[in-house]
Image (tube, helix red, strand yellow):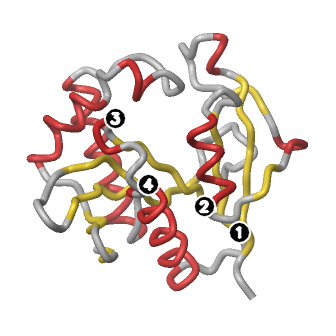
Amino acid sequence: MIDTAGLVLRGWIDADKAPFHAMCNDPAVMEYLGPPLSHDDVDAAVARQNALLADLGHCFWAIERKDDGAFLGFCGLKPGAAGTPIEQRIEIGWRIGRAHWGQGYAREAAKASLHWGWANLDVESIWAITVPGNSRSWGLMERIGMIRRAELDFDHPLPGLEARLKPHITYTVGRPA
């Protein structure tokens, strides 16, 4: 568990599934991520993250707002996807419900995740990917100190992605001195 001034990043619980499902069926949230997720998809995603947490000690943690316990989305660290330039590297990622956009939650969670990564993982860099059109995501990458690595841009190999979602851009940040 990671505590920040206003958030808790933690493993997933059953109560997260309904708001996560709703979030993953919001067209604005999913615009750059792919098709909506079914209840079975959400169950599988939660199980994958909790398995990563059990195996590695980190995952894309659920984000809970401290003042009211609301589920806001996720942020954290996991191994980069197979078949991408960040495979075998640590990836930072996030997804926040639309009602919580623009309030600094993603940045607070991302900075806490980076801090945790530097304190707990023996890596020299942390990586992120997104589609070029997702300016909210790559904008946050830049605000937390990440640098675009255009030479590592790629088409995502995930089967079934729409053509507009295949091109991805790559960012990284090195371990602070």
Badge 2 or badge 3: first in the primary sequence = 2
The picture places residue 28, in percent across and down from the top left corner, at 41, 23
The kind of residue on which mark 2 rests is Ile
Residue 19, placed above or below residue 86: above
The answer to whether the residues at label 1 and label 2 have Cβ atoms under 8 Å apart is yes
Q: Residues within 10 Å of mark 3 (few under 14, many from 20)?
A: some
The residue that label 2 is drawn on is 90
The kind of residue on which mark 4 rests is Ala
The residue that label 1 is drawn on is 125
The kind of residue on which mark 3 rests is Arg
> Which tag is nearer the camera, tag 4 or tag 2?
4
Question: Helix or strand or loop: what does disc 1 sit on?
Answer: strand
Q: Residues within 10 Å of mark 2 (few under 14, many from 20)?
A: many
Going 40% across and 59% down the picture, which residue do you hit? 59
The kind of residue on which mark 1 rests is Ser
Q: Quadrant of residue 136?
A: top right
